[in-house]
Image: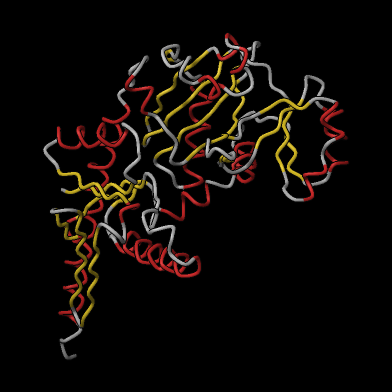
Amino acid sequence: MTVLIITHSQDNESIPLVIKAVEAQGEKAFRFDTDRFPTQSHLDVYYSNGYERQVLTVDDSRLDLAEVSTVWYRRIAIGAKIPTKMEKQYREASIGESRATIGGMIASIRGFHLDALPNIRLADNKQLQLQIAREVGLETPRTLITNNPLAVKEFFEECEQGMITKMLSSFAIYDEQGEEQVVFTNPVTKEDLEHLYGLRFCPMTFQEKVPKALELRTIVVGKRLFTAAVDSQQLQKAQYDWRKQGLALLNCWESYDLPSDVEQKLLKLMAHFGLNYGAIDIIVTPDGQHVFLEVNPVGEFFWLECCPPYLPISEAIAEVLLTEGQRVKQENFKFKILNSKLNSVSYIKF
């Protein structure tokens, strides 16, 4: 059995962790760094009457995609190594055609996908996440998404414990020195309400400030849930967004037991989006409420395995990839047998 890993060359430790877990089961893993396509890797797709062939070549390794039983979709950066000095419209066209080519490659692989791209893209919609989370019974923060300054001011008055702001999409701003400035979650003060003119160019997300006893990261893999907790309030800069001091908190995470009813609601949320994997952020309030923030369908987990509490997440991912891959392989085989029998019947004259 072969697992195809879709990622890029700058991805983190999660890739070798899962590769090691797959190989420990006696199976193969093939890493495809999408930023190396089309400049440093090759894809040959051939269709003819009754015949098709797709071969992916990376360095000296060749992979016949017909051998792939499972796809793990992690990260994508197609065309990143196409020279930036190329004329802009030609570079954009090259990247667009390359994305279409690889997108077609991924979609045409008949094995198990962790997870299917349409499901990931649907689940990336944070607004829909909040809607479904409420429908399955999860607690969520009071939220406003708007480009209307007046609505923000009115919402601010409703948030008795304060208000924070964040973005629906993940991105960074680069300063004149080229330094990355990540956009984190930040508090909104009364003075900030007089400087909302930027909303006419870009909507923002506003939420009531939820008091924190702990912050949780729950990793869902199939039907298994791995949860870790951190006291982000111990560091001033981490109080609104623990990622601001993520390195300082690296060894402060501990295993956490979610209430069974919360676990079941999270699994219902995942089932709605057809996801087998997700990284979920939750706040535990001082009075013990569990408040759902969001799920990232391709979110990170590696630090929870490489550092305390050393959760065996990569093993769980490998298990789902191989078990589900084998199941889909058997179903495809049965379908081929059935189709062959039906074709044989069609030639019988009655």
Instruction: Report whether residue 348 is seen.
Output: yes
| 108 w.r.t. 118: above or below | below
Query: Residue at 59% across / 18% down in the picture?
Result: 238
| 8 w.r.t. 21: above or below | below
Left or right for 164, reference 4:
right
Q: How is the image coloured?
A: secondary structure
Q: Position of residue 97 (x, y in %)?
A: 40, 68
Q: Position of residue 329 (x, y in %)?
A: 21, 54
Query: Quarter-wise, where is residue 303 in the image?
Result: top left
Residue at the far bottom in the pictured view? 349
Query: Quarter-wise, where is residue 290 in the image?
Result: top right
Instruction: Report whether residue 333 is seen.
Output: no
Count the marks: how many?
Answer: 0
| 104 w.r.t. 297: above or below | below
| 48 w.r.t. 298: above or below | below
Q: Nearer the viewer, residue 219 or 148?
A: 148
Query: Residue at 19% across / 37% down in the picture?
Result: 22
Q: Position of residue 346 (x, y in %)?
A: 20, 84
Residue at the far top in the pictured view? 234
Query: Residue at 25% across / 53% down in the picture?
Result: 328
Query: Quarter-wise, where is residue 209 in the image?
Result: top right
Q: Nearer the viewer, residue 253 or 41?
A: 41
Q: Position of residue 51 (x, y in %)?
A: 18, 76
Query: Residue at 21% across / 76% down in the picture?
Result: 342
